[in-house]
Image (tube, helix red, strand yellow):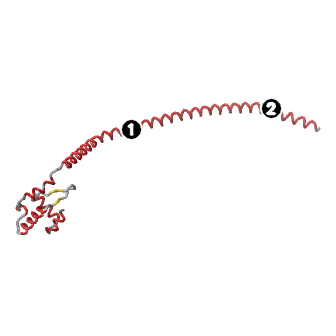
Amino acid sequence: MNTNEVAKEIGVSSKTIQRWVKLLHIPVARNELGHYEFHEDIVLLLKQVKQQMSEGVLLQEIRLPFHEETAHQLAPAVETDAQAQRMEVLEQQVNLLIQQKSEVPAVEQRLQELERTLAKKADEGVSYQLLQHRREIEDLTASLEQLTNIVKQLSTVKEDKDVPRTEIKKKRVLFPLFHSFR
């Protein structure tokens, strides 16, 4: 029987049953989830507790006789081999978690170092690219200046040579035309 069933049968709350079991050190077996499992003998003991309390006996003064059958109920509470193995596995898992927890700061520190290294490498890559672009721009600027100077030189040379000849040609071409009409 579970705690609620026993409480209904005796006529008290489940919390009262749990308090009696703890304060009177009544040996009650527990299931794999840790819940109380009451044997009929234990239920009879709890009924005796209720009867003594209704007679005015204080809870601390109640003395209960434990029978062989009550002691027999403790047998399921004794660890079996499967439970012992399960406990060992759980202890190993707890130890592993504790070990992993202690390794977390080292892993975090290593991760931060890797992030710093990666950021440094990225900065170096960007700096190199910027320098390369700057060199290319300087080379292009120098080439553009050279081309601009060449164009200026060619335009001034052409202006010097072309202007007088065109004026002369115009005069020569026009001069004979005017003389022919006279």
Name the residue located 8 percent from the left edge and 63 percent from the top edge.
59
Quarter of the image with the C terminus in it: top right
Q: CA distance from mark 1 to mark 2?
A: 73 Å
Amino acid type of the residue that numbered disc 1 sits on in the rendered structure: Arg
Secondary structure at badge 1 equals helix
Q: Position of residue 80 (x, y in %)?
A: 17, 50
Name the residue located 51 percent from the left edge and 34 percent from the top edge.
131
Q: Position of residue 152 (x, y in %)?
A: 68, 33
Relative depth, front residue between 127 and 64: 64
Quarter of the image with the N terminus in it: bottom left
Picture quadrant of residue 91: top left
Picture quadrant of residue 46: bottom left
Picture quadrant of residue 48: bottom left
Amino acid type of the residue that numbered disc 2 sits on in the rendered structure: Arg
Crowd tier of the residue under label 1, counting other residues whose Cα lies within 10 Å: few below 14, some 14–19, many 20 or above: few
**Residue 42 bears which disc, if any?**
none
Secondary structure at badge 2 equals helix
Q: Position of residue 31 (x, y in %)?
A: 19, 56
Above-or-below relation of 98 to 8: above
Relative depth, front residue between 153 and 78: 78
Residue for badge 2: 165
Above-or-below relation of 144 to 97: above
Crowd tier of the residue under label 2, counting other residues whose Cα lies within 10 Å: few below 14, some 14–19, many 20 or above: few
Residue for badge 1: 116
Relative depth, front residue between 79 and 69: 69
Name the residue located 23 percent from the left edge and 47 percent from the top edge.
90
Looking at the image, tell me whether mark 1 or mark 2 is earlier in sequence order.
1
Task: State left or right for residue 139 relative to residue 59.
Answer: right
Task: State left or right for residue 101 relative to residue 72.
Answer: right
Above-or-below relation of 30 to 56: above
Q: Position of residue 87 (x, y in %)?
A: 21, 47
Name the residue located 14 percent from the left edge and 61 percent from the top edge.
39
